Image: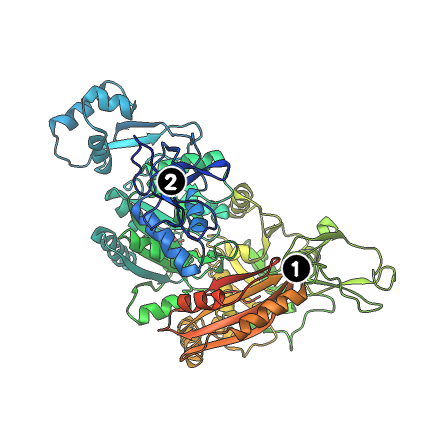
């Protein structure tokens, strides 16, 4: 019997089934491995049959835990094949929380509050209602026994909305969301879009819809209607957010709409909470899960809707371990579950836009902000003509705009996508730059902590009193701004304003995020200074001005998607302004006002920008008009990295529609002490990259201490 173990083996191992056990595919089993016992899953792919029958070890037992369903098993196989990972590695993500004795939540049932939906009252159902009439809530087992019905009857009544299941384990966070709790009165355009989404849910078939609409148009409100439809249909819904740990506003909003909080899933949850949640999902008792990437691997028995909010976000790409894009895999997951996928963004990725144009995705659009709020007016500050004062970073026009905003009792935001005080520290005397010893990167000054810090490996040193190269005292100078430095400047320029810094250093978890959001909503803060963290879906009604300190920042590297991502990020940041009655204003400080990115933001015409971006990618057959896969060589020594990279270069695939770029030193040729080289495979869209990659990797021997990582559809090229 084939059993897949959560390790990087080529495939399932073969085990003998002892008499009395009848494991089926998907069952979670305990099997011997070396001298230990390991948890694995009975798989349906053929096992390695090189071990002779009489040498096979036996399955120890079947765990009392919900089996891994067919849809999830096919999903695991699919991701493994697509990303060139070992199936066991992928399966591990689905199994991570299972252990013998996983916590079982206690489920109790009560009658639904009025209005009770219509359902034919069979004698069995009537008995259930009678039992609950005498006492409620009751445990599932007790209720079934006293009423003399099967659990299936109780599930049916729950799905129909006649019963409400409560997960009652201590600390267990979910009760049944009520789709009728507090629906909003939708505008005309929202009604139409909501109806289309509800239909997609009702069809119970796979489809993909891009829901695109300006910031503040009510996209969230509308896709929550799809979630409500899914709840009414008795199926589970998954909503993926890029930064779930910081999404307190989203959760509060869900609670207002459905009366209870959703189940939350991300990797920072305590393991006990994860176990309870995993079990509840598996038993269909967590009807709505909002989660990060890893929520894709939860064991939903009946997934009826997958929503990916902020679908353009690079944060959906998992870079370590199994390298996958959760946005794309969400679509695959939906396909295996015969469920609709809805991709949501005010700034959709070019991939999704092109899929709409090709007819692969349906398209729904909310064209204007809700409640008559207008889009913010954008202006550019040309830093060549209107520079800030010497040693400062805020131009006079921007300072004036913030002053006006504050004087009117409204809130302002300064955006700079750079943590810390200064990105570079150099010696005024000898020109020495403070560099990370483990990475091709400068050390970033974090003045409040008194440290220089590498943002890639975490290496820190105290800020030295003298230059480590020439020994000159007091000669180290910060170069360029980070948000700490902007905060310092703001304290001088706007001394009266109550300031709040929003960056991953200061907002480190759900509580901090919620506290910050409340402080802003309650207007105990006047000026918000933030990194990309502030771009994410927040709704601050009193915020009317956004100043972007360095709009050119993201364009520096010249990566494939640099322009697209800069437009998306800055448009999202700008979209925080003027979301309620008062009109919003946005100012972008730039040295390149004529750049297409700045012009697109100025004119608010993202469609035109995306069209020209598409044009330039089409010419070179870059994604989404071609396919990319990166090979990243890393090794303990530069010589070994070069050798492996050179061997890969020699073995590079050739053929019609195939191009290999490199080998070349990676832009981060040193990362966490490892030497890195890159090769990039570019193929025509109709060529599959996986068979090419398999043959290529198979032709090269990688010595100990070296490794080759594969990144299919890369979005980072560092
Ligand atoms: P988006 O997700 O497109 O940025 P939201 O769904 O967050 O937009 O809506 C923006 C704001 O407008 C939110 O505060 C939301 O509650 C409110 N809103 C949107 N549609 C409605 C509606 N039909 N009735 C009441 N408030 C609404
Ligand atoms: Zn480093």
Provide the residue designation for mark 2. 54
Q: Is residue 418 left or right of residue 288?
A: right
Q: Position of residue 303 (x, y in %)?
A: 30, 47
Provide the residue designation for mark 1. 636
Which badge, 2 or 1, is on the more N-terminal residue?
Answer: 2
* Secondary structure of the residue carrying numbered label 1: loop
Along the line of sight, the residue nearer the viewer: 149 or 409: 149
Q: Residue at x 76, y 65 (%)?
A: 433
Q: Residue at x 41, y 56 (%)?
A: 80
Q: Position of residue 619 (x, y in %)?
A: 42, 81
Q: Which image quadrant: the N terminus?
A: top left
* Mark 2 nearby-residue class (10 Å; few <14, some 14–19, many ≥20): few
Q: Quadrant of residue 707?
A: bottom right
* Secondary structure of the residue carrying numbered label 2: helix
Along the line of sight, the residue nearer the viewer: 126 or 298: 298
How far, Cα to Cα, is label 2 from label 1?
Answer: 43 Å
Q: Position of residue 189 (x, y in %)?
A: 28, 60
Q: Position of residue 247 (x, y in %)?
A: 47, 47
Q: Is the residue 700 above or below the residue 502 in the image?
A: below
Q: Quadrant of ligand 2?
A: bottom right
Q: Residue at x 52, y 47 (%)?
A: 517
Q: Is the residue 100 above or below the residue 540 in the image?
A: above
């Amino acid at each position: 019997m084939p059993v897949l173990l959560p390790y990087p083996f080529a495939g399932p191992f073969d085990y003998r089934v002892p008499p009395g056990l009848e494991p089926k595919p998907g069952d979670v089993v305990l099997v011997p491995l070396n001298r230990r016992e390991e948890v694995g899953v009975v798989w349906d792919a053929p096992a390695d049959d090189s071990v002779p029958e009489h040498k096979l070890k036996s399955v120890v037992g079947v765990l009392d835990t919900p089996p891994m369903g067919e849809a999830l098993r096919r999903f695991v196989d699919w991701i493994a094949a697509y990303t060139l990972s070992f199936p066991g590695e992928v399966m591990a993500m689905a199994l991570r929380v299972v252990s013998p004795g996983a916590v079982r939540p206690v489920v109790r049932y009560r009658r639904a509050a009025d209005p009770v939906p219509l359902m034919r009252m069979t004698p069995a159902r009537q008995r259930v209602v009678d039992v609950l009439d005498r006492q409620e809530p009751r445990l599932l087992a007790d209720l079934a026994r006293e009423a003399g019905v099967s659990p299936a009857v109780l599930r049916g009544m729950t799905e129909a909305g006649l019963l409400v299941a409560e997960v009652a384990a201590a600390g267990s966070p979910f009760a049944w969301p009520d789709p009728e709790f507090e629906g909003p009165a939708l505008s005309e355009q929202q009604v139409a879009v909501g109806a289309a989404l509800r239909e997609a849910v009702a069809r119970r078939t796979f489809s993909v819809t891009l829901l695109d609409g300006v910031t503040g148009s009510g996209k969230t409100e509308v896709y929550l209607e799809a979630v409500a439809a899914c709840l009414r249909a008795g199926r589970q819904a998954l909503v993926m957010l890029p930064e779930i740990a910081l999404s307190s506003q989203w959760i509060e909003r869900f609670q207002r709409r459905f009366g209870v909080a959703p189940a939350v899933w991300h990797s920072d949850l305590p393991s006990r909470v994860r176990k309870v949640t995993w079990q509840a999902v598996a038993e269909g008792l967590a009807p709505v899960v909002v989660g990060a990437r890893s929520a894709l691997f939860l064991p939903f028995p009946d997934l009826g809707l997958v929503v990916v909010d902020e679908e353009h976000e690079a944060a959906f790409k998992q870079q370590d371990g199994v390298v996958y894009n959760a946005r794309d895999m969400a679509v695959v997951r939906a396909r295996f579950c015969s469920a609709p996928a809805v991709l949501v963004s005010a700034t959709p990725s070019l991939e999704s836009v092109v899929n709409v144009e090709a007819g692969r995705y349906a398209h729904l659009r909310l064209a204007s902000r809700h409640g008559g709020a207008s889009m913010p007016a954008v202006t550019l500050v040309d830093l060549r003509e209107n520079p800030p004062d010497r040693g400062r970073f805020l131009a006079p026009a921007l300072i004036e705009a913030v002053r006006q905003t504050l004087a009117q009792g409204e809130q302002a935001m300064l955006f700079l996508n750079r943590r810390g005080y200064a990105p570079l520290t150099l010696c005024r005397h000898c020109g020495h730059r403070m560099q990370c010893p483990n990475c091709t990167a400068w050390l970033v000054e974090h003045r409040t902590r008194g440290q220089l810090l590498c943002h890639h490996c975490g290496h820190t040193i105290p800020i030295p009193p003298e230059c480590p190269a020439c020994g000159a005292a007091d000669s180290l100078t910060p170069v360029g701004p980070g948000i700490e430095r902007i905060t310092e400047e703001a304290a001088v320029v706007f001394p009266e304003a109550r300031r709040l810094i929003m960056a991953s250093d200061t907002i480190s978890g759900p509580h901090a995020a919620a506290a910050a959001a409340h402080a802003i909503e309650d207007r105990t803060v006047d000026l918000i200074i933030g990194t990309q963290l502030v771009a994410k879906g927040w709704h601050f009604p009193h915020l009317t001005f956004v100043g972007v300190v360095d709009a050119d920042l993201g364009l520096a590297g010249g990566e494939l998607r640099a322009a697209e991502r800069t437009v998306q990020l800055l448009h999202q940041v700008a979209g925080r302004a003027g979301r309620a009655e008062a009109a919003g204003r946005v100012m972008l400080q730039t040295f390149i006002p004529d750049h297409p990115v700045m012009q697109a933001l100025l004119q608010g015409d993202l469609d035109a920008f995306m069209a020209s971006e598409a044009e330039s990618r089409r010419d070179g057959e870059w994604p989404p008009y071609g396919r990319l896969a990166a090979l990243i060589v890393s090794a303990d020594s530069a010589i070994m990295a070069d050798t492996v990279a050179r061997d890969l270069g020699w073995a590079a695939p050739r053929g019609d529609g195939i191009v290999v770029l490199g080998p070349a030193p990676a832009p981060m040729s040193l990362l966490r002490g490892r030497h890195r080289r890159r090769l990039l495979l570019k193929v025509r869209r109709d060529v599959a990259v996986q068979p090419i990659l398999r043959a290529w990797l198979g032709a090269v021997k990688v010595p100990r201490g070296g490794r080759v990582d594969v990144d299919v559809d890369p979005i980072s090229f560092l």
